[in-house]
Image (cartoon, rainbow, N blue to C red):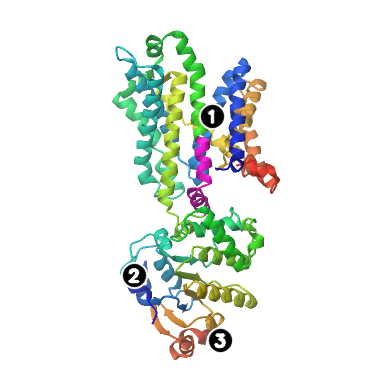
Amino acid sequence: MSKELLRLENVSKSFGGIRALNNVNLIIKEGEKLAIIGPNGAGKTTLFNAISGVFGLDSGRIFYMGRDITKLPPFKRKYLGISRAFQIPRPFAGMTVLDNVVVGALFSRDIKDIKEARVRAEEILSLVGLHSKKDELAVNLTSPEKKLLELARALAPKPKLLLLDEIVAGIPPAEVDKIMGLVVRISEQENISVVALVEHVMRVLKYVERAVFLHEGRVMMDDTPDKVLNSEVVKDIYLGKVYE
Amino acid sequence: MDIRTHRSLIILFLVSLILLFVRVGIPETRQILSILFFYIALSEVFNLFTGLTLYVCFGYVAFVALGMYGGGATIKYLLSASSPPPLAVVLACAFAVAGILALILALAVGWISVRLKGAYFAIATIGLNEGLKNLIEGTGIWGGSSGLVIANDLIQSYNYDTFIFVTSELADYLIFTVYAVTILCIYLVIKSRLGYGLAALREDEEAANVMGVNVVRYKLIVFVISATLAGMLGAGKMIKDVAIYPPQAFAVSYTVEAIVISMLGGLGTVTGPVIGGLIYGVLKYVLTVSFPGLQLLALAPALMAMCVMFPYGIVGWLRRRFKGSKIESLLI
């Protein structure tokens, strides 16, 4: 058994009268690849916001490598190795592609100075296939390229935990294999735990070892992707509607 | 340190130095150039915070005024002794006190206000000028509403020739020194980790935070550096003007000119305020000569036209125009 990396204990968060997260308990192990699935409004992005520290919790605690990080601000969590790619890419539009990735690399525990960050950024850009565009302004990239940039920025700091928010949403099927293949290859090379949020689970099914089904802020199922997909609960709430 | 990577900064410094000495060679330009230099210096100081963060501080003039008062009061105090210390010591103390006062005020104001985002920060700092002005007028410290004048102290402690030299020559060199320190600061900040963090937070503060940038601390650092330099610039202005009165000291108009100059030249660039300042200075001068009395009426549309033509400032436009060439690398 590999070591536990992240643990959520009874995490709850409400917005007004809506309980976006309702007593969520979740353990993520080192090097694990996990998909969190659920229909629109299930609380997936809220869960990511809770893990990356964008807002405080109503109750519950979050442990990372045995340390209580419930009260840490986002930048400190990033420093410890929790890296996130946004659902809608948020590149720093006025900066070059390379500088975008340098920012991602620079603010982390393992990278000491700008020189090292540049080397790392170029390496990651080559891996994701954006190296030829490194001097372009980020705003000039196409949509799939922006997704790749988002991924490169998140991978650059050598994270321990990679949070991918809908990384393949709006991406043509051929590109999905390319992106997910990259994620799997790099995460295995660098022993990164990957948590991917997906609404359309079929698209990433073959790349993950475990699937967690979230519905109305609760963890409804936590099992292998096959079992989760074929369960009656999931079919009723989620897949049934999609494939009607 | 490799000289070649800093070539652009060295060139800018040399150009500035030439400008500084033009005023010695051509006496007619003295008055204009020394005023222009103060505005360029102020724009650079302003640019160090606003250009790098895109946060606007409405209370900026308070730091300059505080520096003027702090520097003036220090000079007055030191010269009131029976045997006044040497001039260099007096001036050094004036700059130190001005800087320290501005630094303390910036820490106190910034500690709370940089936690606010965007426009809320601007609103939070809006009362700073008026508050400080009313404090000085109301309590009567530093001469209260009748102002603080140090001309007599300087003349009596030294002599008239020294007084003229200090106020019309030395003051300009002191302002130039603050300017030189400021461009060095901006340059070093841009090239550092701090600069990358600021560039990211300028684009998207929340994303920068998630990507590991301590946004509150970074904003506070440049706010405090910028305010301290603004205070020192105030000390230079005090030595030049030898008098300060609350209504003029806290007039927002001259910080607005600094904003215009840095936006015209290019926010967040080192060369922007110099280019913007020269254009603005020449434009204002020409309009004043050709449309006396109507210069402000003519200046406004001229500035509007330039803002429409160069939305990223002149330096920003030049950088895009000459992308990839040597000219781009010179426009830091």
The correct choice, above or below, for A151 with respect to B256 in the image is below
| Quadrant of the snapshot with the C terminus of chain B | top right
Q: Residue at x 65, y 22 (%)?
A: B291
> Can you tell which mark lies on residue B62?
none
Q: Mark 1, chain letter?
A: B
Residues shaded magenta? B182-203
Q: Residue at x 43, y 22 (%)?
A: B238
User: What secondary structure is marked by label 2?
Assistant: strand
Residue that numbered label 1 is attached to: B39
Position of residue B50 measured from the top left corner of the image (x, y, whole percent): 50, 42
Q: Residue at x 42, y 79 (%)?
A: A215
Query: Would residue B59 be visible to someone looking at this image?
Result: no
Going by the numbered disc 2, the residue's amino acid type is Phe
Asked if the magenta segment contains residue B66, the reply would be: no
Position of residue A237 measured from the top left corner of the image (x, y, whole percent): 46, 84
Residue A231: image quadrant is bottom left
Same subunit, labels 1 and 3: the answer reads: no
SS majority, magenta: helix
Of residue A126 and residue B197, the one placed in the foreground of this image is A126
